[in-house]
Amino acid sequence: MDNDPELKAWTSDWQAGSDEAHSAEAIRLYAQGRGRFMWTWILAEFTVAGIALPVLAYLGWMATDAVERWAMWLLAVITITAVSVGWWNWRGSLLASARTTAEFVSVSAERLRRMRQAWRIGWVVLLAEVLVFSVWIWNNLYAGTRGHTQLAERFSWGWLAFMSLAAVAFLLRMDRWIRRDEQKFAALKRELL
């Protein structure tokens, strides 16, 4: 919290003239910013799903192996479920607006709670995808009569490990961002109340 220049600037502004109107305006701007962030997040989820679903459906339809077909269909189900649960999670708080400072505080607190919930859902989606991809890779490399090279094996497992680590890094960064956002919100709330 000490190394956040934005929070330091807000704090110094409040201490210079900490009237309730300034704090209320800061809360209002904070809530609006988080609302824009959530719309961007939803748009990104729908964009990824819009690209992934046709590709997965095509691969599932064209698959000659039953395991591969099931893997593609399961990934499509995971994608649909993740977007649906994401939309359900953000429902109500996307269009929420407030006219009073107390309503802005309430809307902001609810949005933070839902961001934390989305973070938890992200871990479940990651686990489900890693399980499906692991079965799919194992089937492609070791099942059946077709052989594989060591390069193909290293690439397959390495790619899964890399993508999984990238997702874990993203989720850990998201957790840190949410914690920082919770601290900013708590500071704004303390100043106001």
Image (spheres, rainbow, N blue to C red):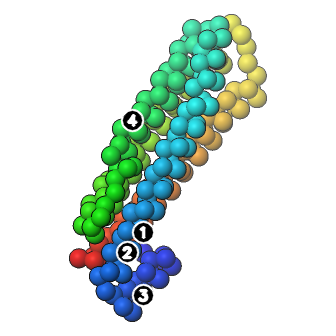
Q: Earlier in the sequence, mark 2 or mark 3?
A: 3
Measured in 3D between alpha carbons, the distance from the residue under mark 1 to the one under mark 4, in whole angstroms, is: 27 Å
Q: How many C-alpha atoms fall within 10 Å of the one at disc 2: few (<14), some, or many (≥20)?
A: few
Q: Secondary structure at mark 1?
A: helix
- The disc at residue 25 is 2
Q: Which corner quadrant holds the C terminus?
A: bottom left
Measured in 3D between alpha carbons, the distance from the residue under mark 2 to the one under mark 1, in whole angstroms, is: 6 Å
Cβ–Cβ below 8 Å for labels 1 and 4?
no
Q: Which corner quadrant holds the N terminus?
A: bottom left
Identify the amino acid type marked 3. Answer: Ser
Residue on which disc 4 sits: 85
Q: Which residue: 49% across, 76% down?
A: 6
Identify the amino acid type marked 2. Answer: Glu
Give above or below for 67 relative to 15: above
Q: Which residue: 26% across, 62% down?
A: 103
Cβ–Cβ below 8 Å for labels 2 and 1?
yes
Measured in 3D between alpha carbons, the distance from the residue under mark 1 to the one under mark 3, in whole angstroms, is: 17 Å
Q: Which residue: 64% across, 17% down?
A: 58
Cβ–Cβ below 8 Å for labels 2 and 3?
no
Q: Quadrant of residue 137?
A: top right
Q: Which residue: 57% across, 13% down?
A: 69
Closer to the camera: disc 1 or disc 3? 1
Residue on which disc 3 sits: 12
* Residue 188 at x, y percent in the picture: 34, 74
- The disc at residue 29 is 1
Left or right for 187, reference 158 = left
Closer to the camera: disc 2 or disc 3? 2
Q: Looking at the image, which is closer to me, 100 or 41? A: 100
Q: Looking at the image, which is closer to me, 122 or 28? A: 28
Measured in 3D between alpha carbons, the distance from the residue under mark 2 to the one under mark 3, in whole angstroms, is: 15 Å
Q: How many C-alpha atoms fall within 10 Å of the one at disc 1: few (<14), some, or many (≥20)?
A: few
Identify the amino acid type marked 4. Answer: Val
